[in-house]
Image (spheres, rainbow, N blue to C red):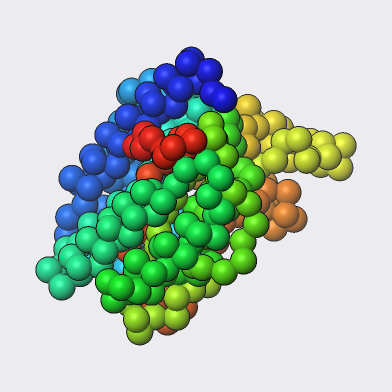
C-alpha cells in the first residue's frame, strides 16, 4: 500500500493537475493561439511547485492525442470546434494525469457531456479485484447508450512513480484484456468518444511533436559525442517522461542532432493521433487511487 507521504504527494499532484486543466479550459476560445494555451498551462504547474509530467496536449476536432505546440506554432483554435486538453503534473515523481473537452459549438456539447458521464460510470465500477476488461465494457456500453462510439485503440493506464505509462492497461472497449485492478495502485482512466459515423479508432498522422528518451536503454558507446551530450542533457532534464522540443534550451542549435536521433530510433516520437474517418473526438480523464471498496479521484 502507499505510504502516507506518497498519498499526500499524489493528492497534491492531483490538485495541481486539476488547476492546470481548469486554466486550460478557461483559455480555450476561438482564435486563441494553441502555443499560448500550452505554455500558460505548463507554467501553472511549475508555479505550483511541480513539473509537467508531459507537454500540454491540445487536440482539435479529429485530433485525439499527442499534439502539443512546436516552437513558433501559429495554430489557432478554429471556430465551432471541439477541443481536448490533456495535462499532467509530477511532484517528486508522483504523477497525476487529467483531461477535459471544451465545445465551441452547441451541437458538440452532447458529446462533451457524454464523455463526462462515461468517465463517471467507469470510476464507479473501479475497486480492487475488478477485471480491467469489465471497466472497458462499462465504458463501451455507457458510450453506446448515449449514442457514441469509443476509440478502441486508445486506453487508460496504470501510473507509477516516475512512470506515466506503467503496467496495467485500462481499455475503452469490452473483450479480453488481461489484469485486475489492485489496491493501492494508481490508474488514469480516460474514455475517448467519437460519433457513430466514426471508425472508432485512431491512426498516426505524419507528424510528431512529443518525444521521450529511455536513458536506461541507451547504449552511449554507440553514439557520436554530440549525440551523447544531447541524450545526457535530455535524460537529466526529463528522465524518461515525455517532452516537447520547445522545452529544450537553444533548440535550433541542436535541432539537427535531435532529428538524427529521432530518425535512428534512439529518441522515441509520439505521432499525432487522429480519428481514422475524420470524425470529432471527445475525452475525459481522471487519475484515481484504487482501494478494496472503491477508488479516490485525485484530479
Residue at (53, 31) in percent of width and height: 184
The one of 124 and 280 positioned closer to us in this rendering: 124
Residue at (26, 44) in percent of width and height: 24
Q: Is residue 147 above or below residue 251?
A: below
Residue 204 visible in the displayed image: no
Q: Position of residue 56 (x, y in %)?
A: 39, 45
Please identify the quadrant where the N terminus is shown: top right
Q: Is residue 1 above or below residue 116?
A: above
Q: Position of residue 242 (x, y in %)?
A: 55, 43
Q: Please give left or right for residue 128 compared with residue 283 in the image.
A: right
Residue at (53, 72) in percent of width and height: 203
- Number of marks in the image? 0
| Residue that sits furthest to the right in the current view | 221
When asked about the image quadrant of residue 234, the answer is: top right
The one of 204 and 193 positioned closer to us in this rendering: 193
When asked about the image quadrant of residue 19, the answer is: top left
Please identify the quadrant where the C terminus is shown: top left
The one of 166 and 144 positioned closer to us in this rendering: 144
| Residue that sits furthest to the top in the current view | 5
Q: Position of residue 178 (x, y in %)?
A: 65, 57
| Residue that sits furthest to the left in the current view | 106
The one of 150 and 90 positioned closer to us in this rendering: 150
Residue 178 visible in the displayed image: yes
Residue at (59, 49) in percent of width and height: 180
Q: Position of residue 131 (x, y in %)?
A: 56, 54
| Residue that sits furthest to the front in the current view | 293
Q: Please give left or right for residue 242 compared with residue 286 in the image.
A: right
Amino acid at each position: 500500500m502507499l505510504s502516507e507521504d506518497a498519498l499526500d504527494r499524489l493528492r497534491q499532484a492531483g490538485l495541481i493537475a486539476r488547476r492546470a486543466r481548469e486554466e486550460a479550459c478557461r483559455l480555450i476560445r476561438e482564435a486563441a493561439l494553441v502555443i499560448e494555451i500550452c505554455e500558460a498551462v505548463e507554467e501553472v504547474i511549475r508555479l505550483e511547485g511541480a513539473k509537467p509530467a508531459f507537454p500540454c496536449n491540445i487536440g482539435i476536432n479529429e485530433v485525439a492525442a499527442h499534439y502539443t505546440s512546436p516552437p513558433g506554432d501559429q495554430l489557432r483554435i478554429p471556430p465551432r470546434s471541439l477541443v481536448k486538453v490533456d495535462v499532467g503534473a509530477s511532484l517528486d515523481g508522483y504523477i497525476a494525469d487529467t483531461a477535459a473537452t471544451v465545445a465551441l459549438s452547441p451541437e458538440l456539447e452532447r458529446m462533451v457531456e457524454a464523455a463526462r458521464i462515461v468517465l463517471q460510470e467507469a470510476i464507479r465500477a473501479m475497486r480492487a479485484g475488478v477485471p480491467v476488461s469489465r471497466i472497458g465494457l462499462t465504458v463501451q456500453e455507457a458510450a453506446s447508450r448515449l449514442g457514441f462510439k469509443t476509440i478502441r485503440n486508445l486506453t487508460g493506464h496504470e501510473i507509477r512513480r516516475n512512470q506515466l505509462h506503467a503496467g496495467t492497461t485500462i481499455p475503452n472497449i469490452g473483450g479480453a484484456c488481461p489484469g485486475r485492478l489492485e489496491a493501492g495502485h494508481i490508474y488514469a482512466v480516460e474514455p475517448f468518444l467519437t460519433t457513430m459515423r466514426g471508425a472508432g479508432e485512431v491512426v498516426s498522422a505524419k507528424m510528431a511533436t512529443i518525444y521521450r528518451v529511455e536513458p536506461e536503454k541507451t547504449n552511449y558507446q554507440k553514439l557520436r559525442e554530440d549525440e551523447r551530450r544531447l541524450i545526457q542533457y535530455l535524460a537529466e532534464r526529463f528522465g524518461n517522461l515525455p517532452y516537447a522540443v520547445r522545452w529544450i534550451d537553444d533548440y535550433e542549435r541542436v535541432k539537427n542532432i535531435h532529428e538524427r536521433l529521432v530518425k535512428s530510433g534512439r529518441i522515441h516520437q509520439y505521432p499525432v493521433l487522429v480519428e481514422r474517418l475524420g470524425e470529432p473526438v471527445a475525452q475525459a480523464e481522471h487519475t484515481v487511487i484504487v482501494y478494496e471498496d472503491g477508488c479516490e479521484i485525485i484530479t
